[in-house]
Image: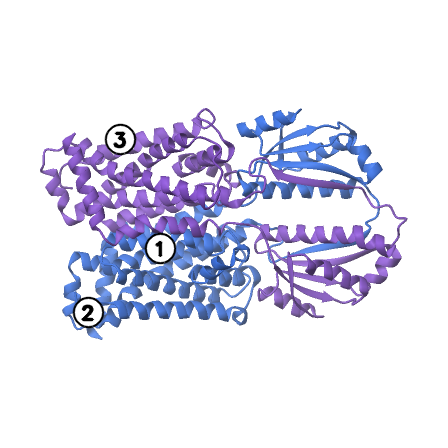
Chain colours: A purple, B blue
């Protein structure tokens, strides 16, 4: 036991002596957490809009006014040529072109029906859908209010409407930050943990101090434990500060139990560190260790269900994500924090994490040999 | 000049002697692009749906049938109370619950409007919005076909430009290209100088007749030639495997991609010159670049939606400009005239970073 205590002390000393690393592992994660959590949103605001009003009538002006009055659209120009409008779309000066045809007012007052064209920049299919929805809403309101006022064909029966009232059962405002903050926190902790542990043994091997440890009578498990404990402490400490930031700065609700989150964090750190140490034992240089860690990190991050939904993935990919510890932790965080789930509801994800931790640490202990490779 | 050539050769030898790293440098971008190109989507296949029908009339039954046959939804549960809805969400069995108010059909006829409550599992706002969108379009479709009265008022005819099928692949694959290329380049070069410092071979370089300019350029060139391979692979995959169209000039795309690589490599070299430990260099280039590039470049979340301070920071991220260029060339078929500004930004970034690296390179230990 005393051996482990000495090893832990040594690791801490090495960490704190490394002046360059300290700001990176202590300050950078939280700066990123605070700044980046605000980036994730699909709300479309102030969409630049180009106008082609070929009618220039009172009614067409009223329609345009409704588009610009709302906060959704911002008129950036108008013209009469198709070429120019498309040029605006190509040059990213407008994401929507509203084309009002020549006989707009006349058709509307005689037949009660007229068409307008919406040319929408659909690079981002999702945003395009949102723009279309906004436009339809504005036109719908125009139809209801403006046409009644102008007395346009009051006798024609409008088809009944289906009003849609949508809201989220949890997170009723569909606040993105409540969802992103816990997830980003997990990713940052994983980054730090994976790298610190991944680089660790390889570094000792590269600079030669690993031989010095190998000639001492310490056992393998003591060595590995001595490496796990300090990073584990750092990881859990950072998780705590991160949770505090989530609560105080972002007002992320905490419907579940803090103890549960702590327990899961502890287990998760074991997974990450075990994996890092394992990577450390199978690579020869720090550069290789970094690349392998990077490879897994990018996969874990993008397939965690945080940025794109797991349900959107093809079935084979969804199965693959079961092997992604970050996915399970993000899932648990969301459920416990936003839904108030207890141990029973998250037992499946928890079991995955526990199993993973056992496998990773065992692998790391087994691979480490006290002989020069 | 002679010493420079020798130096270049040395760098090439270093790279190819390390077989594992070389395999990683070429193989990993390929694997990742393949994996993510198929896995990262924004469309949802099967939404588990629960219906709480307080009306049970012909209209609600028709709407329910339409939802079930739309291909988006899977009828999972019939719910009979708000409590049951709560339970279903807590268990995670349904992603959306639809509530029809009582007397639905009669309300539609009498008042001309009846309400449907669409409840989604808000703990995943991303999915919530997508699902609500699907629901809205199915309901709208029902309204248009069931009530065959003439369209009254203004009708909007939408024309989706550049991506008519609204495939999320077209949005994501260029982003993946940028992300993977940037990370590989920055990682490769960020440790090159610090490794020499740590290994002690820096002394040898310093006493040689090589000037800082030559050393920096000599370190970037081999990786630049190698990244050419990566760029070609990535663009080919995007076109042939994922069907992302390339409506513009392929030559222009190649040129812009290489410019982006140079910028990323310069960033890596710059990181390399400001620290003396490999660990720190690697941490900065990965931990400092991964999340900002994913979140602030417009890869998944549109930059225009972000608050102003973030939009300003996003301008500093090379990937953001490259994404505009790539999406412009591939999806919109724009010519150079439309993207010269973004190209200029990348070129300036590359030059500034290189110049800063040369300045920061200490000719003393």
Residue B68 visible in the picture: yes
Residue of label 3: A362
Residue of label 2: B363
Q: Nearer the viewer, residue B41 or A149?
A: A149
* Same chain shared by disc 3 and disc 2: no
| Element marked by disc 2 | loop
Task: Rate crowding at label 3 as few (under 14), some (14 to 19) or many (20 or more) other CA atoms within 10 Å.
Answer: some
The chain carrying label 1 is B
Q: Spatial distance from mark 3 to mark 1, Cα to Cα?
A: 31 Å
Of marks 1 and 2, the one in the foreground: 2
In the image, B45: left or right of A79? left
What is the x, y in percent for residue A16?
22, 48
Residue of label 1: B184
Please report whichever mark, 1 or 2, sits nearer to the chain's N-terminal start: 1
Q: Residue at x 45, y 28 (%)?
A: A346
Q: Spatial distance from mark 1 to mark 2, Cα to Cα?
A: 28 Å
The chain carrying label 2 is B
The chain carrying label 3 is A
What is the x, y in percent for residue B323?
48, 59
Of marks 3 and 1, the one in the foreground: 3
Task: Rate crowding at label 2 as few (under 14), some (14 to 19) or many (20 or more) other CA atoms within 10 Å.
Answer: few
Marks 3 and 2 close (CB-CB < 8 Å): no
Marks 3 and 1 close (CB-CB < 8 Å): no
Q: Nearer the viewer, residue A135 or B87?
A: B87
Q: Is residue A305 above or below residue B344?
A: above
Residue A300 visible in the picture: no
What is the x, y in percent for residue B309?
48, 59
Q: Spatial distance from mark 3 to mark 2, Cα to Cα?
A: 47 Å
Q: Is residue A249 above or below residue B323?
A: above
């Amino acid at each position: 036991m005393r051996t482990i205590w000495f090893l832990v002390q040594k690791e801490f000393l090495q960490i704190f002596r490394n002046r360059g690393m300290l700001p990176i592992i202590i300050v950078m994660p939280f700066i990123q957490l605070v700044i980046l959590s605000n980036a994730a949103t699909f709300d479309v605001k102030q969409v630049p809009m180009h106008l082609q009003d070929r009618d220039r009538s009172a009614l067409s002006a009223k329609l345009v006014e409704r588009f610009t009055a709302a906060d959704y659209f911002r008129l950036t120009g108008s013209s009469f040529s198709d070429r120019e409008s498309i040029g605006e779309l190509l040059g990213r000066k407008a994401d929507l072109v509203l084309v009002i045809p020549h006989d707009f007012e006349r058709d509307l007052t005689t037949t009660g029906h007229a068409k307008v064209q919406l040319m929408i920049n659909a690079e981002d299919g999702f945003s395009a859908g949102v723009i279309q929805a906004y436009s339809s809403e504005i036109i719908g309101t125009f139809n209801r209010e403006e046409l009644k006022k102008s007395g346009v064909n009051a006798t024609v029966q409008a088809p009944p409407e289906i009003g849609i009232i949508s809201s989220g059962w949890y997170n009723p405002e569909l606040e993105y930050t409540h969802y992103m903050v816990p997830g980003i926190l997990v990713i940052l902790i994983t980054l730090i943990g994976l790298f610190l542990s991944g680089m660790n043994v390889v570094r000792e091997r590269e600079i030669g101090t690993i031989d010095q440890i190998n000639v001492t009578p310490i056992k393998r498990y003591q060595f590995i434990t001595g490496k796990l404990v300090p990073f584990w402490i750092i990881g859990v400490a950072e998780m705590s500060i991160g949770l505090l930031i989530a609560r105080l700065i972002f007002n992320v609700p905490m419907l579940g139990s803090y103890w549960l989150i702590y327990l899961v964090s502890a287990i998760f750190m074991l997974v990450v560190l075990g994996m890092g140490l394992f990577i450390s034992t199978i690579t020869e240089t720090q550069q290789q260790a970094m690349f392998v860690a990077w490879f897994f990190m990018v996969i874990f991050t993008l397939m965690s269900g945080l940025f794109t939904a797991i349900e959107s993935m093809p079935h084979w990919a969804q199965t693959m994500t079961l092997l992604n510890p970050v996915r399970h932790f993000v899932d648990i965080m969301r459920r416990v924090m936003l839904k108030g789930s207890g141990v029973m509801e998250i037992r499946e994800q928890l079991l995955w994490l526990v199993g993973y931790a056992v496998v990773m640490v065992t692998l790391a202990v087994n691979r480490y040999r006290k002989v020069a490779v | 000049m002679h010493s420079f050539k020798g130096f270049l050769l040395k760098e090439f030898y270093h790279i190819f002697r390390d077989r594992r790293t070389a395999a990683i440098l070429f193989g990993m971008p390929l694997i990742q692009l393949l994996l993510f190109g198929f896995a990262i989507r924004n469309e949802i296949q099967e939404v588990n749906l629960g219906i709480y029908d307080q009306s049970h009339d012909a209209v609600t039954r028709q709407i329910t049938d339409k939802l079930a046959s739309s291909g988006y939804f899977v009828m999972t549960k019939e719910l009979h109370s708000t409590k049951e809805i709560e339970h279903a969400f807590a268990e995670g069995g349904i992603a959306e619950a639809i509530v029809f108010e009582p007397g639905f059909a009669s309300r539609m006829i009498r008042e001309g409007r009846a309400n449907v409550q669409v409840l989604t599992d808000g703990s995943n706002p991303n999915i919530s919005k997508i699902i609500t969108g699907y629901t809205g379009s199915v309901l709208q479709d029902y309204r248009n076909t069931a009530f065959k009265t003439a369209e009254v008022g203004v009708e909007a005819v939408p024309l989706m430009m550049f991506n008519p099928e609204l495939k999320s692949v077209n949005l994501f694959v260029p982003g993946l290209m940028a992300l993977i290329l940037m990370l590989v380049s920055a990682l490769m070069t960020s440790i090159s100088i610090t490794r020499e410092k740590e290994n002690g071979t820096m002394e040898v370089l310093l006493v040689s007749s090589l000037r800082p300019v030559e050393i920096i350029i000599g370190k970037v060139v081999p990786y630049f030639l190698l990244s050419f391979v990566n760029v070609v692979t990535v663009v080919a995959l995007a076109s042939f495997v994922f069907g992302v169209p390339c409506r513009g000039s392929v030559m222009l795309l190649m040129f812009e991609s290489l410019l982006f690589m140079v910028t990323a490599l310069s960033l890596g070299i710059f990181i390399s010159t400001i620290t003396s430990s490999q660990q720190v260099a690697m941490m900065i280039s990965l931990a400092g670049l991964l999340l900002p590039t994913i979140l602030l470049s417009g890869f998944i979340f549109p930059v225009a939606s972000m608050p102003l301070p973030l939009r300003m920071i996003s301008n500093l991220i090379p990937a953001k400009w490259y994404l505009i260029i790539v999406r412009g060339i591939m999806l919109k078929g724009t010519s150079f005239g439309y993207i010269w500004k973004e190209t200029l930004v990348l070129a300036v970034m590359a030059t500034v970073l290189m110049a800063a690296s040369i300045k920061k390179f200490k000719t003393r230990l």
